[in-house]
Structure formats: C-alpha cells, structure tokens
Image: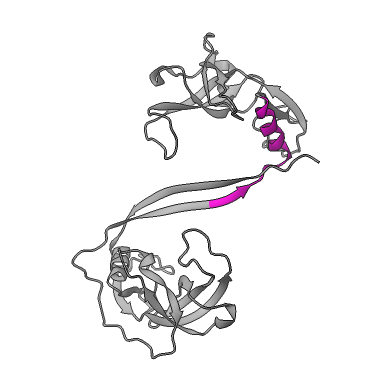
Amino acid sequence: MPEVLKAPLVVEFPFTRSLGPVQSAFLTGLRERVVLGVRTADGRTLVPPVEYDPVTAEDIRDLLEVAPTGTVTTWAWNHAPRRGQPLTTPFAWVLVRLDGADTALLHALDAPGPDAVHTGMRVRIRWAAERTGAITDIACFEPHDGDRAQPAGHKGEFEDPVTGIVAAARLDYTYSPGRAQTAYINALSGRRTVGERCPSCRKVYVPPRGACPTCGVATSEQVEVGPRGTVTTFCIVNIKAKNLDIEVPYVYAHIALDGADLALHGRIGGIPYDEVRMGLRVEPVWTEGSRYPDHYRPTGEPDADYDTYKELL
C-alpha cells in the first residue's frame, strides 16, 4: 500500500474592517465594561447588535445597555483548547442570553469540568484586565450565584469611539491528498510532472484530482507533461507576502504545460517583470532538494501562437 501523505497547513491573514455606528458603539462599550444591544421595531433587544433587522431588513440604531449577567441557553465542552482561543485550559463554549436581551452571545465559560455546566445556569462576564475595544475585552464568562446585575442605562455615546478593528483570521488543518495528487507529488520529487487523462473527453488535467471536472468520471491513466509550457495569463504582484522571501514586484502566471489541457500556476523569474507576456515559452527551475519547481524562466523559444492556448485562458 502506498504511503499516505499528509501535512499541517495554515491559512492566516489580518482582516481589517471599518465599523459602522452600531458595531463601533458595541465594541467601544466593551472597552468601557458596558454591553450594548440594539432594539428592533417590534421591541426585541439583539445582543450582539446588528445594523439591520433580521426580520424586516430595516436599519436599526436604537442602542441600549443590557446586564453583564445572563443565562446559558446551550453549551458544548472544549476538552482541548487551540491556539488563540479565549482560555488555555478546557472550557465550555456557551450561548448566553444576557439579562435584558432576547438573543444569545457566543463566548467561553470558565468551568472546572463538563459536569459543572448545564443549560439554564446563571453566569456573568469576567472582564479582561486590559481592554481595547474588541470581543476579547470579555475574557470569558464565569458561574454566578448572585443577583441579576442592573445596567446603568448607557445609550452608546462615547468620547473616543473605536472606528476600526484588525482581526487575525487563521485556519490550522491537516491536509491529506488523495491517490491522484499523491502520484502527482511523488512524480514532482523526481522532477517530473504527471497528470491524468479523462477516458471520455481525453483531456489531460494537471494537477490531477482523480476525476474529470467536465465529464465527472474517474481518471486513472497517467500522462507525463511538460516540462516546458506557455504563459496564458499572469499578474504582477506588488505587495510582499509574509514569510515569503521574494522581492516585489514579481510575476505569478498560469502556465499551460505542453501536453496538458489545464493551466497550473507558478512564479516567473529570469526576466524583468514588465517583459512577461501571454504566449511566453517557459521551463521549470529546480533548487537543490526541492520537491517542486522554484519558478519558471524563459526558454528562448519564439512566443506561442495565441490560437494554441486560447482555450486554456
């Protein structure tokens, strides 16, 4: 049985957004230890607040304060906290309907174990020691046996409102390719590029996916393509990527390898970025120990005729 390949992958980027009046007031309120909701035309109080009524789609701007105490409506135990989660020890994810609200807020509950958590339990907000105007200003919820807290009646007006936020979006996962992509990756380690031919339409797809995206039938016939190819389309990259040691500007292109019916993407090097063009003939450049081409460079051949690659755009 062939080796099952797998690798940890991370997709991460900073997400920057500006805030409208409702979200600005909500996050600024958290900074000031105030929880604000928004009242709809039919009298419901929504927490977290939204800018449009989910029933009527009308603008809603009527802010009002709710209590920092509330009731758990449902929960799930997290036995293995991950990087960036609110607590580093096992905790419960809970939906909490704060006193005065008609909807529930998702956050973490600090509890000694799942036996200590139940629907209907009373909880209160544990505020973060340092607050900046973000949902993390609520450090977590904690069990509460005291009286219901009474809000002060804050209306959401602040001298120094939060107008924008930067949230780090991150996805950690383990990727395992299937049979077709495993064969493709193994071939690359030998500096060969292998695709698969559809038994129906006879097109060769690189990288292979194990099935024809047009006909929907399984593919198994392996076909070696390239190594040379043709630039079909490209873009000039002017923003430097994190952890990528490539000076900008550089060119990223779709490259139709000879014998393939699908263009793959790769970086173009060995030529000034403003001289890259559609139809440019290129070949792969490998670095020592690499399992895939570092980039593609011009072969010196005449440019390919447009009619030879127009169907691959």
Q: At which x and y percent is residue 40?
A: 36, 74
Q: Quadrant of residue 247?
A: top left
> Residue 179 colored magenta?
yes
In the image, is 6 to the left or to the right of 24?
Answer: right
Q: Judge from the rendering whether residue 166 lies leftward or rightward of residue 159; answer left or right.
A: right
**In the image, farthest residue toward the left:** 159
Residue at 60% over, 28% down? 289
- Report the label total: 0
Of the pair 22 and 168, the residue shown nearer to us: 168
Horizontal relation, residue 52 to residue 74: left or right: left
Image-based side of 167 in relation to 288, left or right: left
- Classify 230 as above or below 171: above
Q: Residue 238: horizontal and vertical position, in percent?
A: 37, 31
Say whether residue 92 is magenta. Answer: no
Which residue occupies the extreme right position in the image? 1
- Is residue 215 visible from the viewing direction of this image? no
**Residue at horizontal 43%, vertical 47%?**
13
Q: Is residue 107 above or below residue 120?
A: above
Coordinates of residue 224 in the picture (x, y in percent): 71, 23
Foreground residue, 118 or 204? 118
Residue occupying image coordinates x 81% and y 41%: 1
Q: Is residue 182 above or below residue 189?
A: below
From the top left corner, tell me how far across and down residue 298 is, in percent: 51, 15
- In this orientation, does residue 162 appear? yes
User: Which residues, given as a range, are shown in magenta?
Assistant: 172-190
Location of residue 258 by image quarter: top right
